[in-house]
Image (tube, rainbow, N blue to C red):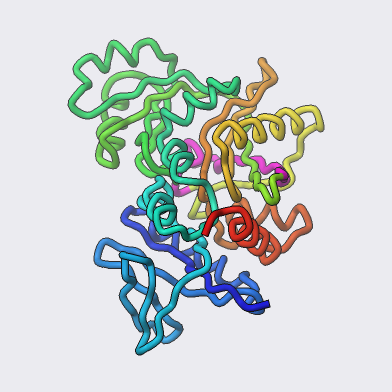
Amino acid sequence: MIRKKIALVTGGYSGESVISYRTATTIRQHLDSSLFDVYWIDITREGWYYVNESDQRFAVCKDDFTVKVSDQLFRFDAVFIAMHGTPGEDGKLQGYFDMLGIPYTGCDATTSALTFNKRYATAVAAAAGVAVAKSVLLIKGQIADWEQRVSALRFPLFVKPNNGGSSIGMSKVQQPGAELQAALDKAFAEDDQVLVEEMIQGREFTVGVFSAGGALTVLPITEVKADADMPFFDFVAKYQGKSTETTPAEINERMAEKIRSAAQQVYRAFNCRGVVRIDFIFQADEQQPYMLELNSIPGQSEASIIPQQVRSMGWTLSELYKTLLMDCLSTQPQ
């Protein structure tokens, strides 16, 4: 078999780029070199570059996503998107690759744009019959009546930028007043749209789902607990070791099946592709999972949740990444 040329696209235009590089590093380490020639593509506001093993940088031609090194022109068979935040997680790159006819891992442009927008994502999930928290969307320049609108919600609340992931700019608010105003200011510093959402009381779980050949695989469920000194599972808890993650989660089969069923329901409702991670709160009184958000490009650092779940299932990351790449090569038009 002729090795496929894979562009491993990372970086990005947001503060999440630091996480993107960690994700890309793990993916590169676990891609089978007998099957794939991997090219590290760094996308930043300063430019798009292929970075070789000697750390030399070569400009990417954006007209056709090719790279010229000396007299050799490289065209890619597929793209492995390892970028959190814009433009890799919000549909922009996906639309670009669609126009060029280059297959890529993960969700398509429409799904990526929808899931990147928390308000749209909860609306789609609710329409599909999945439980979601009650919320209010505030838009900069259109918030004259924000206090009245938020008063319809029950405290405590979560205040977070509407677009993006990794819980950057997110706050937990116990009561109205200065604390709420500070949380809004923090969130509006990250985005022009802010989601104010009721907190659902319960245990937090997250689960990966991926498709290959049209069949869905639900990975082992992880329970997430922020450390006692952390108010919730925020950016610091996620990426600086301030949380406890138990995989597989210590729950009974009835609860596990409800979470797995909801995860599959969400995956299908959004017409997802590749591997995603879906976060839930399990509300004990109602005995049902509430969807918090869908991560269309979940973190892949060695300590991230998806790698934990893959190993718990008995797979290697090499098997997962091979499956994702071969699926996108076989199912997407070129």
- Residue 265 image point, x, y percent: 64, 30
Q: Is residue 15 left or right of residue 167?
A: left
Dividing the picture into quadrants, the one containing residue 128 is top right
Assess whether residue 142 is covered by the magenta stretch: no
Q: Nearer the viewer, residue 61 or 248?
A: 61
Q: Is residue 218 left or right of residue 47?
A: right
Considering every residue shown, the one lying at the far bottom of the view is 70
Q: Is residue 199 left or right of residue 71?
A: right
- Residue 331 image point, x, y percent: 61, 53
If the image is split into quadrants, where does the N terminus sit? bottom right
Q: Nearer the viewer, residue 178 or 76?
A: 76
Number of marks present in the image shown: 0
Dividing the picture into quadrants, the one containing residue 125 is top right
The residue depicted at 36 percent of the width and 83 percent of the height is: 56
- Residue 109 image point, x, y percent: 44, 45
The residue depicted at 57 percent of the width and 41 percent of the height is: 272
In the rendered structure, which segment of residues is drawn in magenta?
A: 215-236
Q: Is residue 154 left or right of residue 201?
A: left
The residue depicted at 50 percent of the width and 26 percent of the height is: 124
Considering every residue shown, the one lying at the far right of the view is 253
- Residue 12 image point, x, y percent: 36, 58
Q: Nearer the viewer, residue 126 or 99?
A: 99
Dividing the picture into quadrants, the one containing residue 325 is bottom right
The residue depicted at 61 percent of the width and 41 percent of the height is: 224
Q: Is 233 located above or below residue 282 in the figure?
A: below
Assess whether residue 217 is covered by the magenta stretch: yes
